C-alpha cells in the first residue's frame, strides 16, 4: 500500500531494440545498460530504465537523471548520454509503452453469458464480454471489443477495432465509428432533455434521433451524450472527451476537439474543428463556436465566438480581457476606497 | 457515418390521419401529399414530410419550408399551405412522434437471468430485464419496465408504468411513484455524505433514510440522489432532472421543477414548486428556495431566495443586477485608468 | 408516497441499554419511556423516541422537543430531561444508528453467477455478489463485500472489510486498502486523459499506472478516479470523496481530505493532509496545495496555495479578500456612476 506502484515490463529490450521499435538513431554513450527494465520519468528513473526528454526545458533534468537510456529529439538533445534520437518524442513514448506494457486483449469470442438479439452481426476477431446485452440488429465490427456488462439497444453499430472498455450503455440508435475508445459508465443515447410548457405543465417531447460517434473518438468514464430530438447528436472524428462530460441532444462537435472533464454543452450547440474546452466549462444551448476556439476551465459561454478566439470566465470574454478584469477586480476594494477619498476631497473643496 | 441520421416512421399516414391523431383541423392547401413519410424540422423537411410551427417567429421559415404538411396554431398560422391547426403545437408534435416512431416496449416478462429476492411482487404486464437483481420485498407496479442490469436493494418500490431504462441502481429504500422515467447510470439511495469531526477524525454518520420519487418525475443518465440521514430525500411530482445532477441527502424538491444537467444541490436544501435551475448551478446546504425561482446556469447559490426571484452569478444575485454588474465588470480596467487619471488631476491641482 | 418515510428500528432498547451502547451516563428525568422506538430529530421526535443535542445552539430546541430520551454532552446538557450524557454526541449517534438500523450484510459467499478469473483469492467471510466479473489474480480481503455487478480487471486488490456497494468498476490495476467504502457507479482506473500534439493530431499516450486507495477512504456514487500515466494516482488514508467527483491521472491526495460532490481535480495535482474542497470546486493540473487548505464551493484554483489557506472564487483568492471583492463588485454599477459624476464635476471646473 505504501510502496509506489511501478508497472512491470513484459520484455526487457536492448538499446538497439528500443531504437528499432521507435525508428530512432541510437547514440551509445557511457551509460547504456545491456537491457532496459522499463520506462520511467526523468526524476524516478534508475540506471536500468529508459526515460525521455519531452521538451527543451527538461534538458537540465535529463542531464541529472540516472536513466540508462534517454529518448531525445534533435531539438532537445542531451549529448554524451546513451540515447535514441527521434523526431517526435511523445510518439516514441507511446510506442514504447505499447511494447513494454501492452494492455491485455480479451479473446476473440462471444462470452456464453452475453445475450444477443436477433440478427446481430459480430465481425471477425471481435470480442463480446460477460453479461453484455445486445439488442436486435446490432452490428459489431471486426476486431472490436465489448468489455463486460455493455448494453446496446437494438440497431446500434460499433466500427472495427473500437473498444467499449466495460459497462458502456447505448440507448436509442448509436452509431460508433472505427478505433473509438469508450470508458466505463458512459451512457450514449439517453433521451435529450426537452420539455415544453403546455397548459402549465412540462410536456416531454419524445427524442427519436441518434448519436453518431465518428472514427478515432475517445469518450471518458461516466460521460453522457444524449440522443437527438430528430436527426443526430454528432461527435467529430478524432475528438477526445474526458470523464463526466455532458453533451446534450443535437450538439454537433467538430473533428479534433479536446473536452476536459466535467464540461457541459447544452442542446444544439455546435463546435468547429479543433476546439479545446477546459475542465468544467459550460456552454449554453444553440451556440455556434468556430474552429480552434479555446475555452478556459470553468468558463460559462452564453454567446457565439468566431474561430481562433481564446476565451475565459463566466460570462466568457477574451482571455486577455479576462485576466485584466480579474487583476482589476482583485483591487476593487482599493478602488472603492480611493473613489470615496476623491469624493470627499471634492466635497471638501465644494464646501470651501 | 457521414449521412445524417433520419428516423424511419413505422407508418405513413394520410393528412387526414395526422389530423385525427392530434385532434386538429385539416386545411388542405395546394401541397399536401397523399401520405406523409415522417416528421422533420422546417429547414430539413422534404415534400413528403410533416413539419411544425412552434412559435410566431418561425412563420417566415415555415412559409419557405418544403414540408408537405404543417402543424400550426391559430396564433401562428401559415395560410395557403396544407396544414393541421391545433391549439398546442408541441403537444401535437409529441403525439406525432409517439405514433410515427414508437419506442419499442419489452415483453411483459421476467427475464430468466433476473435474480429476485424473496417476496418480490411484480405487477401485471411489468417487465424485468436481463441481469436485474432485486432484493427481498421489492414491489414493481403494473406495466412498469426495468431494463437490463437494474439493481434494487431490498424493500424498493416502483410505481405502475414507470420505466428504469437500463442499469439503474437503488441502494437503501427507494420509493418511486407512477409514470417515472429513470435513465441509465442513475444511482438513487447512495449514502448521504455526512461526516462529523470527532477527536480530529471524520466520523461517518450512518444514513438510514430513504429516497422518495413522486409521480411523473424524470431522472437523467448518471444522476445521483442520495438517501437521507433520517427520514427522506424527496423529489416532487412532475419534476424533471437532467443528466449528471447531484441531489444530496435530505433535499426536498418541490413539484414541477426543472433541473438542467450537472446541477448540484447540497444537503437538506429545499426547492419550492416550479423552480428552474440552469446547467451546472450549485446550491449550498440548508437553503430554502421559494416557488418559481429561476437560477441561471453556473450560478453559485449561498443564501435563501423568496418565490419568483430570477438569480444569476456566483455568489448569486438578482439577474438584472448580475447583468449590470457584469457589464460594469468588463469595463473595470477602464474605470481603474479613469480613477488614476482623476487622482493625478487632483494631485496636480493640490500641488499648485 | 405522501407520508414521510421513517426507518423502523430492529430493536426497542430500554434507556439503560441505550446508555450502555454508547458508554454514556443515564440521568433519568420525568419523561423516559420504558422502551425507545428509534432515533429522531429534535423537531420530529415523539415521546417514545431518542433524539440528540449535537451543538450548543440546539439546547433550546431540545428543551421543547417531545423526545423521550436525549443524548447530550456535558458541554450542552439539558437538565431535567431523561438523558444520556456522553463526551461525543455524534459518535453516540453513529453507534445508535448502527444498533437500531443495522445495514444488512450479504452472506459470506461467492454468488454462482460471479465470474472469477484464474488464481483469484477470496478471503474468509468475504462476499462476491451476483454478476460480478473478476479478472485473473484479483485478491479480495477477509470480510470484504463486493455487491452485485462489480467488475475488477486482472490484478486488482481489495483490502479486508472494504465494501464495493454495487456496480463498481476497476480497470487497470487498482489497489484498495482496508475498510474502504465505494458507492455504485464509481469507476476507478480508467485511462488518464493524456494527449500530445504530434504532427497536428492529438496522440493518445497509453496510461499504464495504477490507482491506489489507502485505508478508510470513502468514494461516492459515479465518481471517477483515473489511473496514472506511469506509477500511481493515490487517495490518502481516511479521505472522503462525495458523488460525481473527478480525480485525474497522477493526482496525489493526502490523508483526511474531504471532497464534496462534483469537485474536479486535473492531472498531477497534489493535496496535502486534511484539505476540504467545497462542491463543484475545480483545480488545474500540476498544482501543489498544502495541508488543511479549505477551498470554497465552485472555486476555480489555478495556482499553488500554502498550508492553512482558506480560498474562494474563480480564480481563487483568500476567502476574506473574496468576500470583500464580491461586496465591492455588487456595487460596481454605483461606483461607475459616481466615477462619471466626479469626472463631470472636474470637467465642469476645468471648463470654468
Image: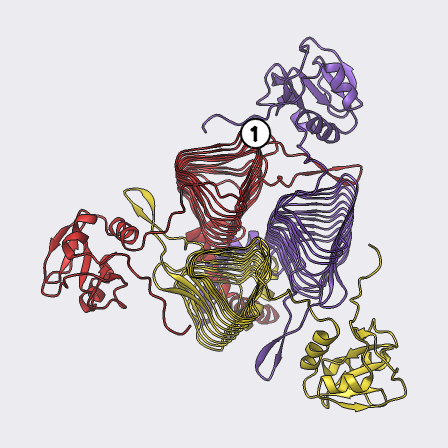
Chain colours: A purple, B yellow, C red
Q: Is residue A89 visible?
A: yes
Query: Is label 1 in a helix, a strand or a loop?
Result: loop
In this view, A216 is above or below C67 = above
Q: Position of residue C289 (x, y in %)?
A: 47, 39
Asked where in the image residue B288 lies, by quadrant, the reply is: bottom left
Which quarter of the rendered picture does the N terminus of chain C lie within? Answer: bottom left
Q: Position of residue C129 (x, y in %)?
A: 48, 45
Residue hosting label 1? C231
Report the residue at 18% width, 66% height from top: C63
Q: Is residue B295 visible?
A: no
Q: Position of residue A220 (x, y in %)?
A: 64, 47
Asked where in the image residue A348 lies, by quadrant, the reply is: bottom left
Q: Position of residue A182 (x, y in %)?
A: 67, 46
In this view, C30 is above or below A99 = below
Instruction: Tell whether C191 sits left or right of A309.
Output: left
Instruction: Tell whether C341 sits left or right of C37.
Output: right
Report the residue at 69% width, 19% height from top: A70
Amino acid at each position: 500500500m505504501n510502496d509506489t506502484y511501478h508497472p512491470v515490463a513484459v520484455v526487457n529490450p536492448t538499446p538497439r531494440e528500443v531504437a528499432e521499435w521507435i525508428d530512432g538513431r541510437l547514440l551509445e554513450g557511457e551509460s547504456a545498460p545491456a537491457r532496459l527494465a522499463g520506462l520511467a520519468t526523468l526524476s524516478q528513473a534508475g540506471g536500468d530504465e529508459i526515460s525521455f526528454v519531452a521538451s527543451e526545458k527538461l534538458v537540465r533534468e535529463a542531464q541529472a537523471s540516472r536513466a540508462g537510456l534517454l529518448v531525445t529529439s534533435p531539438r532537445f538533445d542531451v549529448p554524451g548520454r546513451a540515447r535514441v534520437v527521434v523526431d517526435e518524442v511523445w510518439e516514441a513514448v507511446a510506442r514504447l509503452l505499447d511494447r513494454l506494457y501492452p494492455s491485455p486483449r480479451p479473446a476473440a469470442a462471444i462470452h456464453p453469458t452475453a445475450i444477443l438479439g436477433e440478427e446481430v452481426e459480430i465481425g471477425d476477431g471481435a470480442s463480446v464480454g460477460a453479461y453484455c446485452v445486445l439488442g436486435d440488429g446490432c452490428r459489431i465490427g471486426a476486431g472490436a471489443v465489448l468489455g463486460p456488462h455493455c448494453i446496446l439497444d437494438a440497431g446500434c453499430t460499433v466500427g472495427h477495432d473500437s473498444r467499449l472498455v466495460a459497462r458502456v450503455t447505448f440507448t436509442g440508435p448509436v452509431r460508433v465509428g472505427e478505433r473509438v475508445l469508450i470508458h466505463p459508465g458512459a451512457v450514449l443515447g439517453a433521451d435529450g432533455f426537452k420539455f415544453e410548457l403546455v397548459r402549465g405543465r412540462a410536456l416531454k417531447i419524445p427524442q427519436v434521433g441518434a448519436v453518431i460517434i465518428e472514427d478515432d473518438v475517445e469518450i471518458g468514464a461516466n460521460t453522457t451524450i444524449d440522443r437527438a430530438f430528430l436527426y443526430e447528436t454528432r461527435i467529430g472524428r478524432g475528438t477526445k472527451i474526458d470523464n463526466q462530460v455532458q453533451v446534450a441532444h443535437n450538439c454537433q462537435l467538430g473533428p479534433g476537439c479536446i473536452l476536459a472533464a466535467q464540461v457541459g454543452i447544452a442542446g444544439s450547440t455546435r463546435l468547429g474543428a479543433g476546439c479545446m474546452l477546459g475542465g468544467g466549462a459550460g456552454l449554453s444551448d444553440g451556440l455556434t463556436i468556430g474552429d480552434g476556439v479555446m475555452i478556459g476551465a470553468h468558463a460559462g459561454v452564453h454567446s457565439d465566438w468566431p474561430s481562433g478566439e481564446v476565451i475565459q470566465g463566466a460570462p466568457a470574454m477574451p482571455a486577455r480581457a479576462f485576466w485584466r478584469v480579474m487583476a482589476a477586480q482583485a483591487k476593487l476594494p482599493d478602488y472603492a476606497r480611493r473613489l470615496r477619498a476623491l469624493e470627499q476631497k471634492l466635497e471638501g473643496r465644494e464646501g470651501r
